[in-house]
Amino acid sequence: MATENISFTGRSSEELSNQQKIFLFLGFLGLFISLIASFNFIENQLVFWLSASLILICFGVIGYTREMYKNTLPGIKNNHVYFKSLTSRGVWAYALGIFLTGFYVVLYFYPSYLGLSESGKNTGLVALFDPLSQLFSGNPASQWFVYGVFYTLAILLFGVKFIWKYRHNKYQRLRTFSVMFFQLGFAFLIPEFMARLNSDSFALPYYDLKNIWPLNYYNFEQYRVDEFISAGNIGIGLLLFGVLSILIVTPILTYKYGKRWYCSWVCGCGGLAETAGDKFRHLSDKSTQAWKIERWMVHLVTVFVVVMTMAVVSTYLGYDADKYWLTKPIFLIGSTFLLVLVYAWVLIYKRNAFKKDALYAGGGFLLAIIVLVSLNLLGWTHHLFFIEAEPLRASYGFLIGSIFSGVVGTGFYPILGNRVWCRFGCPMAAILGFQQRLFSKFRITTNGGQCISCGNCSVYCEMGIDVRAYAQKGENIVRSSCVGCGICASVCPRGVLKLENDNHKNRLNENEILLGNELNLHDYTK
Amino acid sequence: MSNQEHIAIIGNGIAGVTLARHIRKNSNKRISLISDESPYFFSRTALMYVYMGHMKWEHLMPYENSFWKKNRIDLVQNRVVAIHSEENKLIFQDQQEFIYDQLVIATGSIPNKLGWPGENLNGVQGLYSKQDLERLEEFATDAETCKSAVIVGGGLIGVELAEMLHTRNIPVTFLVREPYFWNNVLPKHSAELITKHIQKHGIDLRLSVHLEAIKTDGAGKAKSVIIKETQEEISCDFVGLTAGVKPNIEFLKASEITTNKGVVVDEYFRTNIKNIYAIGDCAERNYSLGNRPPIEAVWYTGRIMGETLAQTLCGNPKKYNPGNWFNSAKFFDIEYQTYGWVFPTPKEGNAHFYWKHETEEKAIEIEYNRATQEFVGINSFGIRLRHEFFDQCLKAGKTISFVIEYLKQANFDPEFFDSYEQEIKNQWKNENRKLTH
């Protein structure tokens, strides 16, 4: 059928200038150096080779970007996005997807292939990064350090590209600058420097302060809590900060600004998605079917992380009771009470905001938790959730922490879009989304009757929200999944969408007849 | 179901689809939506994004395919060739007959052809339908199959077509009759602003020129155009005809339905035949309505007509009452919005206030009444404005000073954007002072 292949015959889409070819070569040369290091071809002059690799990568990406944008006028130019193999699930997309997936598998499960040595001296890629790690923390590199460097570099370099692409849009520039700052400072440099402070008598766990539980699902595991406690006031402060972050900080900031304050301004996963993943944002599935899957999946992960954390914490509070101020019964009763409180609040004030299946599912899980906690506290069950906490923790770490957020979440960027993890898997996004949907001032305002249903907003929504469905009805967009990246408003050719924090009252607006038609439906002619 | 009145709608554009949706909202009637162009409703305004590679064809459809069945709107892909109104019968191109109780004609427009020699050659076309997009894809695939293109007619579709061809690196010559682009709608200052912007993108914009003829290569395809004023011959492989559109009503000529340029309708969109109505681009009002032209070929008015007629057909008769005029467009990178009326030269007794940013391509132009200071309308370029604000100002008969004073409330630009309200205010005060002294 002619329409199926429409616009796939253009041949002009991937012409590169000679300068671009040179920068492409230099960038890949840099990557190549790291790659051959993995095969132990580089054993001497590590500082030189590491510097060469990183500098070439930076030089290549920045130079290529400059060449790409220097002769274009500012404005939205998504030209040829659907003609290019890389951005329309062609050969290059799959090649990149397979490469990234493979990299994550090795990183998570076979770090020794990268040259990590638990006892002796690192080899290969990890060894290549030893000098840099020594410089920051004073320790040899780990696979996580290597990953951290590449991750940060990706956010910084593609952040520069993003800023160039949206140089006409101050919201996008500031937002991108923010994720670059938080990645470089909070996720990368500060934890490295914190590690430098560690000594035999004082040790803080590796802590990215902006990485909040439940995204940081391991934050309250025993080894970390023990480290926090043993690090004196600073450690207790950090532990307290971790608890307050989710319970106090997130509701306040989400109330004021929507979940975007975190998801598209601060978060590292979001940061990577917005910068390196920007090229793939249009690949998210916009179907109702996908939305149904998303609702269940992301909330099931949230239940999983809550259950897992309760099991883990109550277990060590149980068998090491004398070590902690908090006792197991207080912890269990307290956290269950908190869940009951939230659910009761929803039932009383917000029940209309939910579909029945959501209320039933939420109630069902809550009831199960109450019963199991009671049975456990009464001493009728040995394990809170029938099995030991450790397999729960391990399977969460494996299934969600590694496979979902890493292998699938990032590895599948070129196939499923850049926010697969954020949309279908991130429990932090689910909690912030819950807050955003129910009590935030944030919304995307639709500008009266100006929508022409063109669909740019929906196509370029990385969260798979069918923005047009609301805009063409003149309705504001209030969706728990919206990360507030603002791209829908940027690509709108008619100035229809605006991200705003405003009065909660007029946030949801439903009109049968759009602005611009004086049809008065209540004025029935007798 | 069979007892339900059967409403047949010819045309599944924004007017017809809005009508169908709203009938379904308000009734249980049987609805048939007939179109030959495409089985499912798509956003005509977004055709350009498919050619430019921003989107795929499937993205143009605002409703999932299951929507129609779920809402019991029967989609009929066929072409109506005749209407036998006395028998309430449609004849399709395959000779099938189709019976209706109420008929709504919403067949939209076709591109104008003004009798130019060669206007029917291959490689000569407008940009309106899905089929136009397919033909464009064939004749202007890339810079190899199409070494250069000429666009005739400086309107909104013309500038879209220029942008489209530009993304495929096809050199474009753009012939415009007016001294500035869209000067028949925009006042000179802003028309000039857009003109410069188009030229900045590398479009060879020829002003105040007319097309004389399109020459053939001998094999039925266009090879060049001749400009009337200079007799210059410009060679090209593609000619875009974008000198406006006209109602798509050729198939009605043999019917009993009264037509002029469009299907003639009254305030309730009734034609001369009792159970036949017309809405959207193809309808022509037989009465005047403010400053609105009798045929309004605009997305928004098509939608408003659909919303309104649905009420009438569901037993709640409503006159067409579209309220304050508004529209929008985008010229390459400059967004344009308008609320109320700004005429190319101020209407009698009116004046224009024009502000332009010193360096950037941002401007506003306000028309107001000199004597009463009443705000008449605003054009905005590169600054987004709030529809609701201006709708209220126009309804309340606010003055230009009020509008300028509260312009900040009207701003709809993204957060953190530079704002220009103070500058605009200052300029207005300065000009006003001069006027009163």
Image (cartoon, coloured by chain):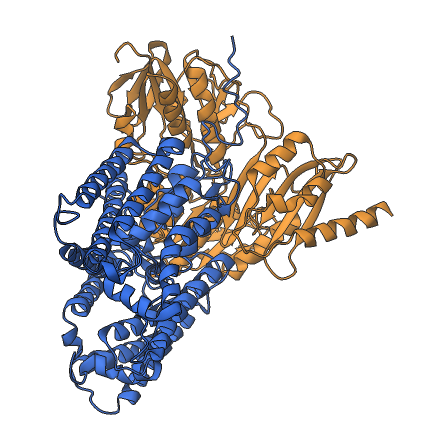
Vertical relation: A525 (above or below) A139: above
Vertical relation: B264 (above or below) B86: below
Q: Give the letter of the orange chain.
A: B
Vertical relation: B226 (above or below) B328: below
Q: Residue furthest front?
A: A322
Q: Residue at x 38, y 42 (%)?
A: A479
**Residue B114 pos. (x, y %):** 49, 39
**Residue A450 pos. (x, y %):** 49, 39
**Residue B198 pos. (x, y %):** 53, 56
* Image quadrant where residue B291 sits: top right
Quadrant location of the N terminus of chain B? top left
Give A427 or B277, whichever is nearer the viewer.
A427
Q: Is residue B406 left or right of residue B270?
A: right
Give A427 or B112, whichever is nearer the viewer.
A427
Q: Could you tell me if residue A519 is visible in this image?
A: yes
**Residue B164 pos. (x, y %):** 41, 53
Q: Residue at x 16, y 59 (%)?
A: A394
Q: Is residue A143 left or right of residue B215?
A: left
From the image, state the color of chain A.
blue
Q: Residue furthest bottom?
A: A44
Vertical relation: B166 (above or below) B95: below
Q: Residue at x 69, y 31 (%)?
A: B397
Q: Residue at x 57, y 46 (%)?
A: B182
Give B70 or B177, whichever is nearer the viewer.
B70
